[in-house]
Amino acid sequence: MRVVVAPDSFGGTLSATAAAEAIAEGWRRTAPDDELHLLPLADGGTGFVDVLHAALGGTWHEREVTGPSGEPVAARWLRIGDTAYLESAAAAGLHLVPRERRTPEVARGVTTRGVGELMADARRAGVTEIVVGLGGTATSDGGAGMLAALGAVPVDAAGTPVPDGSPATAVRLDGAPGLDGVRLVAAADVDNPLLGPHGAAAVFGPQKGADAATVAALDAALARFADVLAGLGRDVRDESGAGAAGGLGAALLALGATRVSGAGLVRELVGLDAQLDHADLAITGEGSFDWQSLRGKLITAVARGAADRGVPCVVLAGQVSVGRREAGAVGVDSAYSVADDAGGVEASMADPAGTLAALAARVATRWSR
């Protein structure tokens, strides 16, 4: 039996590569004769560039940039030909803000400046295309910090630059981004709009430390900043993917970026379809298989690719909150929770690889033939 193992990373506990290896290790305990093809994937969030490097090679460019809370962090971007690939999480990732510091105050002030610094570095290196993976950020600044780093500084009514993470008082951009001649691609991990109940603040703010009052304030600030972004010539507040990475998607779209599915782009570049053409089963997964997973994340890309070929697809996830009907609608045949199998979230988090492998071994008894 030929099995394609194509997971995303597991929420800061396992990289996509580590998750694939754990699934394979467990599967082989039960079905040692199955032919396993490991294909770690990403959808634009954490691990996006690592997955591309593993599949395609390229040259790393490492830089020290501004982290989400203003501190310096080490980040890197990948050059393949004349294209630069970078991920917003490398410079502004949620993993860079310790859990105990994810407070309403911090949620209001984190910045995407480091993302702009990576883009500027790629531009100086002479690339003609920059692909930005969107997802996994600690930020909700609408890309204000990124724009400032590129030379388009948000200023208030008095012409004073506003803090990178606080675009609420911005009325216009002073200067222009230094990206002439560079094609931009926004590889989004979700299709959320910028504002409202499905927007950047409401959906993703709470996991970044925002309480209800802060969510309302962030949404209002992003609404005002959308007017500033419209000054670039394109009103993007209602566009799909504008809410990705705390509204960074909106700023990139306003700069003229082409929006693509991050999962779809990775699927194409690493050759997932060719692997599925000859598969008997597809296995994918991520940290939490929830309703957000159904809005353009990796699981949907794998499941739909498998369904197109009549190949069953199963999900192994840290936690599962998607119902059978909703999962089936995107091509998932069955979904299994590591936490349920291990006896709770705490037990699964204590040994992420071991508990994922144990679940895979048990699932193989049902699906291997």
Image (tube, helix red, strand yellow):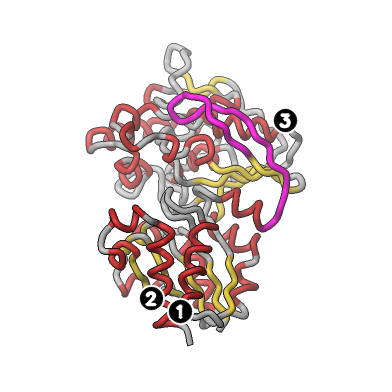
**Between 70 and 366, which is closer to the camera in this rendering?**
366
Q: What's the residue type where badge 2 is placed?
A: Arg
Q: Nearer the viewer, mark 3 or mark 1?
A: 1
Give the magenta range.
55-76
Say above or below: 117 vs 42. Answer: above
Q: What's the residue type where badge 1 is placed?
A: Thr
Q: CA distance from mark 2 to mark 1?
A: 8 Å
Find disc 3 in the rendering and name its residue.
Answer: 124
Q: Decide whether residue 123 is among the magenta residues.
A: no
Q: Residue furthest front?
A: 29
Residue 66: percent from left, percent from top: 53, 27
* SS label for mark 3: helix
Residue 30's disc number: 1
Which residue: 48% across, 60% down? 19
Give the side of residue 180 with respect to residue 187, left or right: right
Residue 191: percent from left, percent from top: 44, 53
Q: Earlier in the sequence, mark 3 or mark 1?
A: 1
Residue 210: percent from left, percent from top: 29, 36
Say above or below: 1 vs 91. Answer: below
Which residue: 54% across, 72% down? 305
Give the side of residue 227 with respect to residue 24, left or right: left
Find disc 2 in the rendering and name its residue.
Answer: 362
Q: CA distance from mark 3 to mark 2?
A: 51 Å
Q: Earlier in the sequence, mark 2 or mark 1?
A: 1
Q: Earlier in the sequence, mark 3 or mark 2?
A: 3
Which residue: 49% across, 29% down? 67
**Between 17 and 241, which is closer to the camera in this rendering?**
17
Q: What's the residue type where badge 3 is placed?
A: Arg
* SS label for mark 1: helix
